[in-house]
Each structure stands twice: as structure tokens, then as C-alpha cells.
Image (cartoon, rainbow, N blue to C red):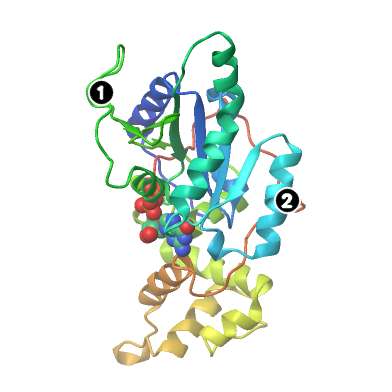
């Protein structure tokens, strides 16, 4: 895959803000895309959020399969991490999310109670771009998006939303940067829209996506784009097949692969192709990279 540019300025700022905000909360709510939880979880998490209670929401679980969601949740639980499926666009998202966050935070409340202190849990939502952070915050905050009030040491720009008697939520998400050293994981981030398309070669990414999907779910793929060759040897041939299926043909008979690439990425991100995850806990995916090396990280929002 071509080298992806990154923006040190933005990325450094996002990181500073995140580090500052993390100090203010008891619970870090990690939102990951259920289709690629590994790619979404930055190894920097470990150093940034140690000593914080963490809850993982496998969001967009409607775009993956039930069995894969279950396997991932079992995997997280085996690591001692509270994890749950979520569809943050659904009506029930608020209730589900709040009850999971509150029950995860119960031991903290209990400890304070024993000391005679009435404590309100404070939480923040974090994640890479496009996983559904804002959707979740809007769901939880809803109409009651009122400012809870200034607190010592909290700048005016930070707003706390009172969610319940026990829980307040920071109304801005913490933005995480993807780690792009690992090609497979970087590809997954590109597929789900976590890396800005304007720094990517979209035709290359869409071709690779089609090629990967052809291995994972050939029947669904061919039923959507009829003229795909299941035995194509090169990713780009599949993108050309999409052009033929959809009639994306320019004057002179040239195939409009640019248009096909945009359509494929849009349809995949919108969950129109298949409900399947790109990653499984038992996959032999390469280990997380060196958390101290930021040189290829990207801030993509
Ligand atoms: N299918 C599906 N789409 C979702 C879900 N949550 C968010 N989205 C969509 O994903 C896109 C990105 O969401 P957004 O909240 O802006 O992500 P953010 O960049 O992490 O803040 C939007 O088009 C949402 O409507 C979900 O659970 N399922
Ligand atoms: Mg957002």
C-alpha cells in the first residue's frame, strides 16, 4: 500500500487534548468498529489509559455477524475488559450504553461510598475517526445536553452532560490516531473510513477491499456486483468488474474506476455489501507495533 501522509500538528494536538481530558475522568469508553476491533485499538491505549477503568463498545455491530461479535466479546472478557455490542444509531443505544457504563463503574462508587463520599462517575468517549463516537455521545446526551457547570481545573470549553445521578459524560470525544505500520490493520482502517480518503489512493483501497471481501464473502459480493470474476488474480480487476456491473463506462469505452471506488467504499461503509467482520480474535494478525514510535501515525478527522 502506498505510504500514507500524516499530519504531525493535528496529531500532536489531538494527543495533548486527549491526555488532558483523560485526567478528568474515571471511565474511558472505547468505541471500536465491530468489523475490525484490533485495527481500532491503538497500542498507545495501554500507556495513555493505564489505571483507568475501560469499557469497550463494539459499535456498528449491525454490520458484523452475530457469531463474530460474540467471539470478540468473549475475547475481550478473557482479557478482563468489559465489552459489549452496540448499535449507536439505534433507539436503545442510550439505555444499553448507560447501563453498561454504570455497572462497570459500580466498584468505584462503592469505594467512595465506604469513605462516606457521594461520587458521580465521569466518563469520556474515545476512538479512531468514524467509529460512531459522536453518534453515541448524541444518543446518550440527547436533549439534556445542558452544561453541568464549570469545575475547578476544567476549562470553559469542556462541557459535562449529566446522564444520571451517577454519571456525567464529557461531550467531546477523544480522537485517537490509527497505527499504520501494520499493513493489514492500516488497510482495515482505510476500509472503514478512519483514514481520510483524500490522503489515500481510493482506487487502490477499494480494489484491496473487494479482493479481501472476495475471500470472506464471495457470494454476497457477486450478488451485489454481478460481473465480478471470483477467480480474479489482481485486486484492480475486481474494481473494473464493478464498473462493468454498474455501467460506469466513460466515452471511448474507458472504465470509470474512480467512480466505482467511491461507490464500493460508500456501500461497504454503509453496510450494504455483507455483515461480516474483517478480523477475528483467532486470526494470526501481527502483534501491535512499538507504542513509542509515532512516526507513521495519522490524525484523520
Ligand atoms: N450501521 C451503523 N452505522 C453507525 C453506527 N454508529 C454510527 N454509525 C454511522 O457511522 C458514521 C460515523 O459516525 P460518527 O458518530 O460521526 O463517528 P465519529 O467520527 O467516531 O464521531 C455515521 O454515518 C453514523 O451514522 C452503528 O452502530 N451502526
Ligand atoms: Mg465525531
In the image, residue 222 lies at what x, y percent? 58, 85
Residue placed most toward the observer, 41 or 240: 41
- Pointer 1 and pointer 2: residues touching (CB < 8 Å)? no
Determine whether, in the image, residue 178 is placed left or right of residue 218: left
The outermost residue toward the top is: 115
> Looking at the figure, which quarter contains the C terminus?
top left
Element carrying mark 1: loop
Separation of residues labelled 1 and 2 (CA atoms): 42 Å
Residue placed most toward the observer, 173 or 145: 145
Above or below, 298 against 205 in this view is: above
Above or below, 193 against 104 in this view is: below
In the image, residue 277 lies at what x, y percent? 62, 61
Tally the marks: 2
Q: Quadrant of residue 16?
A: top left
At horizontal 29% and vertical 16% (from top left) the residue drawn is: 151
Determine whether, in the image, residue 139 is placed left or right of residue 51: left
Above or below, 141 against 72 in this view is: above
Q: Look at mark 2 in the image and give the residue it sits on.
A: 281
At horizontal 44% and vertical 18% (from top left) the residue drawn is: 23
Q: Earlier in the sequence, mark 1 or mark 2?
A: 1
* Residue 263 in view of the camera: yes
In the image, residue 6 lies at what x, y percent? 40, 40
Element carrying mark 2: loop
Q: Look at mark 1 in the image and give the residue it sits on.
A: 149
Amino acid at each position: 500500500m502506498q505510504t500514507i501522509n500524516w499530519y504531525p500538528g493535528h496529531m500532536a494536538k489531538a494527543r495533548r487534548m486527549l491526555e488532558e481530558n483523560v485526567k478528568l475522568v474515571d471511565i474511558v469508553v472505547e468505541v471500536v468498529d465491530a468489523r475490525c476491533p484490533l485495527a481500532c485499538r491503538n497500542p498507545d491505549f495501554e500507556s495513555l489509559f493505564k489505571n483507568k477503568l475501560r469499557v469497550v463498545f463494539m459499535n456498528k455491530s449491525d454490520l458484523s455477524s452475530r457469531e463474530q461479535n460474540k467471539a470478540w466479546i468473549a475475547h475481550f472478557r478473557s482479557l478482563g475488559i468489559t465489552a459489549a455490542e452496540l448499535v449507536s444509531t439505534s433507539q436503545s443505544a442510550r439505555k444499553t450504553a448507560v447501563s453498561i457504563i454504570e455497572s462497570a463503574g459500580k466498584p468505584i462508587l462503592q469505594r467512595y461510598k465506604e469513605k462516606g463520599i457521594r461520587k458521580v462517575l465521569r466518563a469520556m468517549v474515545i476512538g479512531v475517526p468514524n467509529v460512531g463516537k459522536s453518534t453515541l455521545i448524541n444518543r446518550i446526551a440527547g436533549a439534556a445536553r445542558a452544561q453541568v457547570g464549570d469545575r475547578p481545573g476544567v476549562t470553559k470549553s469542556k462541557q459535562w452532560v449529566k446522564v444520571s445521578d451517577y454519571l456525567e459524560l464529557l461531550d467531546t470525544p477523544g480522537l485517537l490516531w490509527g497505527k499504520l505500520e501494520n499493513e493489514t490493520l492500516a488497510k482495515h482502517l482505510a476500509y472503514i473510513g478512519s483514514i481520510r480518503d483524500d490522503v489515500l489512493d481510493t482506487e487502490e483501497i477499494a480494489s484491496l477491499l473487494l479482493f479481501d471481501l472476495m475471500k470472506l464473502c464471495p457470494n454476497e459480493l457477486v450478488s451485489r456486483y454481478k460481473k465480478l470474476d471470483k477467480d480474479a488474480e489482481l485486486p484492480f480487476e475486481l474494481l473494473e468488474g464493478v464498473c462493468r456491473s454498474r455501467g460506469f463506462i466513460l466515452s471511448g469505452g474507458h472504465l470509470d474506476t474512480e467512480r466505482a471506488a467511491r461507490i464500493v467504499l460508500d456501500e461497504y461503509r454503509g453496510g450494504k455489501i455483507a455483515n461480516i467482520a474483517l478480523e477475528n480474535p483467532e486470526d494470526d494478525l501481527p502483534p501491535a507495533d512499538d507504542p513509542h514510535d509515532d512516526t507513521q501515525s495519522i490524525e484523520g478527522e
